[in-house]
Image (cartoon, grey):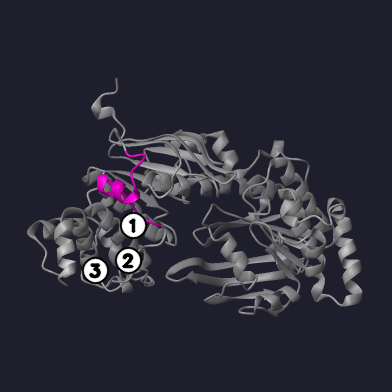
Amino acid sequence: MTMAHDQPRLQARGVTVRFGGVVALSDVAISVPSNAIVGLVGPNGAGKSTLLGVLSGTIRGSGTITLDGADVTHMRADARARAGLARTFQHPEVFGELTVREQVSLAYRVRHEASRLRSDLLLGRGRRSASAGEQRTVGEILDLLGLDAVADRLASGLPLGTARLVEIARGIVMTPRVLLLDEPSSGLSTHETQQLSRALERVVAEYDLSVVLVEHDVDMVLSLSKVVYVLDFGAILASGTPAEIRANVDVRRAYLGEEEADLPASRHHAGTGPAAAESGQTPALLSVSGVDVYYGAAQALRNVSLEVGRGTVTAILGANGAGKSTLARAISGLIPVSSGTIRFDGSDVTGAPPHQIRRSGLAHLPEGRGIFPNLTVAENLNLAARSLSKARRAPAIARAAEMFPILGSRRRQLAGRLSGGEQQMLSFARVLVVTPKLVIADEVSLGLAPLIVDEVYQGIEVMLELGVSVLLIEQFVRRALSFASYCYIMRRGEVMWQGLTGGAATEAIGLYLGRHDDAGPATAEAVGVGVAELNQGAPASPIGRS
């Protein structure tokens, strides 16, 4: 029999979730000990957010959830919160017209003085003076997280990093037993992430609570967590200590793709990146210089620069949330840049509308499928050819279909009924109808079986044979490195490494999964200074309102 002191603080067993015919989670089990941070990581689409929703009660599925041994499986989300399961969200939900102290005080009253709070609200006394217990508890938590210096500032003017600490403070003041953190470092700089890590260490050390940390930043998770669970395709791929996860071959394969020896024969393609462009051997077709991009208060790209030579394949790698897709959208004109320049084929296209960039010869294959699922294959191709003159349309469509013979036999089939690989082939064919100069291929193998991925890369080979350059954003690192000649590795919106692909694999492992010799976060005592530094950042947009 398990002793009480060995009993998990939070436990999930046999969790399965289906969305229609899609199995999002399959027989997942995790155990969260007392006073510990437990990490939950995995590639894009692995099921992390779904599992967090099941734990918090916002998503229903089969299986059981227990909190300190008590079954909470059938409790609603609000009941679980009262029982001791607090949660934060990817975007800080702050009340813009309340101060930091008032934000935390409100959470205290919801948890500890619910009946009195309802009475105050009915009588219009929402800002009554705090009780002695409230003042003491709120003050302690603000001091713990280094928020006392900004306690009387309105939340609408806070930097994003500070706003995240405010949300954590509201969670702590409700005296939870488990705090579920959903991407708390999203949008933060490396320095802000370090400050957040120190705050989490102090919270766990000084309060009787456990933390489940869902994060794209695997290195952060490994540096903080006692136990780490890795999800892949909705199932637990591995679990163990950070050192065990770093060394796990299956985890590396999930993040980096198959070992090079397991890949089909491929070839590196012409050009050696920026060095060749500078020497005049392969003039730069695309040049990105010092680009910054913001999503509200969150800076998604920081001073990003890169080049793509003519006739080359250039890879952009990085863990989820690194900024790869944001960079692709910025180059394509789908989102604005706040600073920096983008030049394509000799022209400045910074701020140009997407259709103008497309007509200049830059095609963007977005993450997912760039097709119209309710149109037939033929209709998809005809629509792609509308920018051509009538005389050129039929030959262009015939040429594109000829490159991918499977499409010719399915011209009358709805695109949405094609297999995943066939849909991606149709995406390629639609792009090649107008013969672009550069294709940005964003995660074109996402969600496809390995054999289908082989077919997709054969499609990219077709592009290259036509002289099209490719900017390849790929989740399967080793696949990309076996194909490209030059590589950029991104982390938190910045280019952390660039060079020939021969040296990129080791760098990628370190940036994706951390290094064995990492010192980890600094000691917790520095967190008070950190908030003052955070306050120098960009203000957070007020999501909530009083």
Q: Are marks 2 and 1 in contact (CB under 8 Å)?
A: no
- Of mark 2 and mark 3, the one earlier in the sequence is 2
420 versus 67 height, above or below: below
The residue labelled by disc 1 is: 195
Residue 94 disc label: 2
Label 2 CA crowd tier, 10 Å (few <14, some 14–19, many 20+): many
Q: Is residue 463 magenta?
A: no
Magenta region: which residues? 72-89
Using the image as rendered, state which of residue 320 and residue 173 is in the foreground: 173
Locate the C terminus and report the quarter of the image it occupies.
bottom left
- Of mark 2 and mark 1, the one earlier in the sequence is 2
Q: Position of residue 244 (x, y in %)?
A: 47, 33
Q: Where is residue 232 in the image (x, y as percent from the top left)?
A: 55, 41
Which residue type carries mark 1? Gln
Comparing labels 2 and 3, the label whose residue is closer to the camera: 2
Marks 1 and 3, how far apart at CA: 16 Å
68 versus 482 height, above or below: above
Q: Does the magenta stretch include residue 76?
A: yes
Residue 240 seen from this side:
yes
Q: Identify the residue at image location x=56%, y=53%.
A: 318
